Amino acid sequence: KLLNVLNRLVDAGNTVIVIEHNMDVIKSADYIIDLGPEGGDEGGNIIGCGTPEEIAEINESYTGQFLKKFLS
């Protein structure tokens, strides 16, 4: 349901910025900025930027490691 609403907003020409941990939402993104490597004081660095497929190829990215499974 959320993805349908987000897709309708994008289809109407809007830019949508989402902070999300749900892989169904992340794999549907046009562009990802992955922050890490950990959370809190150990995070906040840009690990990678790009499409879900590009993030999935970044070995240091926890998001990429999970995305790879969802994209296969």
Image (spheres, rainbow, N blue to C red):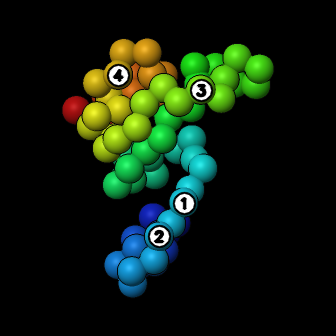
Say which element carries label 1.
Answer: loop
Q: Earlier in the sequence, mark 4 or mark 2?
A: 2
Residue corresponding to mark 3: 45
Q: Residues within 10 Å of mark 3 (few under 14, many from 20)?
A: few
The residue that label 4 is drawn on is 58
Compared across the picture, whether 9 is left or right of 39 comes to left
| Viewer-closest of 18 and 21 | 18
- Which residue: 45% across, 64% down? 3
**Residue 43 falls left or right of residue 50:** right
* 35, 52: nearer the viewer: 35
2 or 45: nearer the viewer: 45
Label 1 neighbour load within 10 Å: few <14, some 14-19, many 20+: few
Of the image marks 2 and 3, the number of the one nearer the N terminus: 2
The amino acid beneath tag 1 is Ile
Labels 2 & 1 near each other (Cβ < 8 A): yes
What residue do we see at 27% from left, 37% from top?
53
Which residue does the image show at 46% across and 52% down from the upper left? 25
Numbered label tally: 4
Query: Which label sits in the foreground, 3 or 4?
Result: 3
Q: Earlier in the sequence, mark 1 or mark 3?
A: 1
Distance, label 2 to label 1, CA atoms, is 7 Å
Residue 60: % across, % down: 43, 15
Q: Secondary structure at mark 4?
A: loop
In the rendered image, which residue does mark 1 sit on?
17
User: What is the spatial separation of the Cα atoms under label 4 and label 2, in whole angstroms?
Assistant: 25 Å
Q: Position of residue 54 (x, y in %)?
A: 28, 34
Q: Compared with residue 19, is residue 3 higher up or lower down, i.e. above or below?
A: below
Q: Callout 2: 10 Å neighbours few (<14), some, many (20+)? A: few
Q: Quadrant of residue 10?
A: bottom left
